[in-house]
Amino acid sequence: MGAEVKAASKGGEADQDDRKTAGFIAKNLQPFKVSRVAHNFAFAREILKTPGVNQGRGGVTERDLENPEHVSFFFLDGERHRKRRASVASYFTPKAVVTRYRPLMDRTMDELIAKLQREGSGVLDEMSLQMASNVAMEVVGLTNSDNHKLTQVIRQLMNSNPAIGKSPLYQFVHKALLGWYYKGLMMKRTMDLYKNHIVPAAEARRKEPKDDVMSYMVKEDYSMKAMIIECMTYAGAGVSTTREFIVMAAWQLFERPELMARFLNGDEADQFAILEEILRLDPVANYVYRQSTIDIPSSVSGKPVTKGEVFAINIRDVNTDASVVGECPYKLDPDRAKRMKMAGAWMSFGDGPHRCPGSQVALHESRVFLDRLLRVPGIRMAKKPELVLSVQTQGYELRGAVVACDRK
């Protein structure tokens, strides 16, 4: 049902459901063990914005590092998080997008489209992976080695454990029989990342610091372990989600000629409105987690929040809460946010102090990618993507979509 536009038996706009992944996620993904799941917008916002309700869930976010100051700011809370986040804010400003990342996006698309037109077809998620990886690694500062090899190393590291997402029994047997092999493979790939990509970048930044994460890590004398974790954190946050969203947006636009025409004829603001509405319906990450270190006696949920409770925020449900998104909550309506006077992506990028700092970068690279791709002569989707469950990102992956065009 979630894979196609459908109308209920009564028909009509009120029953329109333009989501692509809702049925798949409902069937295949359950949240980790928590005290409560937040399904409505008001309660989710309270959990995400209240100081003392912290990132992650018990036993997950702790980092065993030699220096606790080297924990990625993604995993910090309170004043430490605020200060560390402020130190990287310049990486995600509109100026940074225009002056640093936009030229890189254009060069990447020149390369991807030239290859697409030369070969006549391409795998969409491989193309989006290259775009997302190029931009994320520019933010990090991993720019002193072979970019294509770096992208492949990141992809391999993010898929190093084939047992993730499988049943507990499967994971137990897999670990018992093949755990040693995959542990060794993970170590080999990690050292590849460090020796062939992190070290050259770090050595270059010692000689000539830049405004990027690597320069900060060199200045603060990060250990090898801390550098690897920071780079992989940015890879997970900045590469995997953007990669999937580009494919999702392309899928929606290819199947909706009128929406594609609006996208291609619209200005930047209208293009963003379309992309954010697509993301509202099919957020890449379905759950985010918080653990309370305080009591909230008068919670908007109607039930007090107590210290120690763990929450899963169901982003998909929150984004379709009719009390805030209005009528026809499952309909793809790019004018919805303006009409409702709300941020277009709703909570797809989170909310509160941990709202995704790179949201504007991700939207810009998605817009540039799609604007360039959809203008290629003869462009069409030759094969739809296959849905794959991602327990790591608590959502979906889209694999195998093929786009074709006129050869040049």
Image (cartoon, helix red, strand yellow):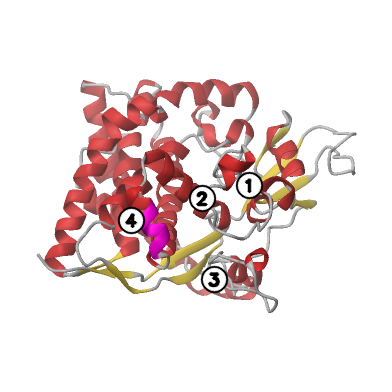
SS under mark 1: loop
Residue assigned mark 1: 60
Residue 109 drawn at (x, y percent): 22, 50
What's under tag 4, amino acid-wise? Answer: Ser
- Classify 10 Å Cα crowding around label 4: few (below 14), some (14-19), many (20 and above): many
Q: What's the distance in space between the residues labelled 4 and 2, CA to CA?
A: 23 Å
| Amino acid type indicated by mark 1 | Val
Say which residue appears at 17% left-offset and 50% top-offset.
110
Task: Identify the magenta region.
Answer: 257-262
Residue 88 horizontal/vertical position (percent): 44, 26
The secondary structure type at the circle numbered 2 is loop
**Residue under pointer 3:** 5
Observer-side mark, 3 or 1, equals 3
Mark number for residue 128? 4
Label 4 vs 2, first from the N-terminus = 4
Q: Alpha-carbon distance for marks 1 and 2? A: 37 Å
Identify the amino acid type marked 2: Pro
Which numbered circle lies on residue 334? Answer: 2
> Marks 3/2: CA distance?
16 Å
Is any atom of residue 187 visible in this view?
no
Mark sitting earlier along the chain (3/1) = 3
Q: Which mark is residue 253?
A: none
At label 2, counting other C-alpha atoms closer than 10 Å, the crowd grade (few under 14, some 14-19, many 20 or more) is some
Q: Quadrant of residue 373?
A: bottom left
Q: Quadrant of the N terminus?
A: bottom right
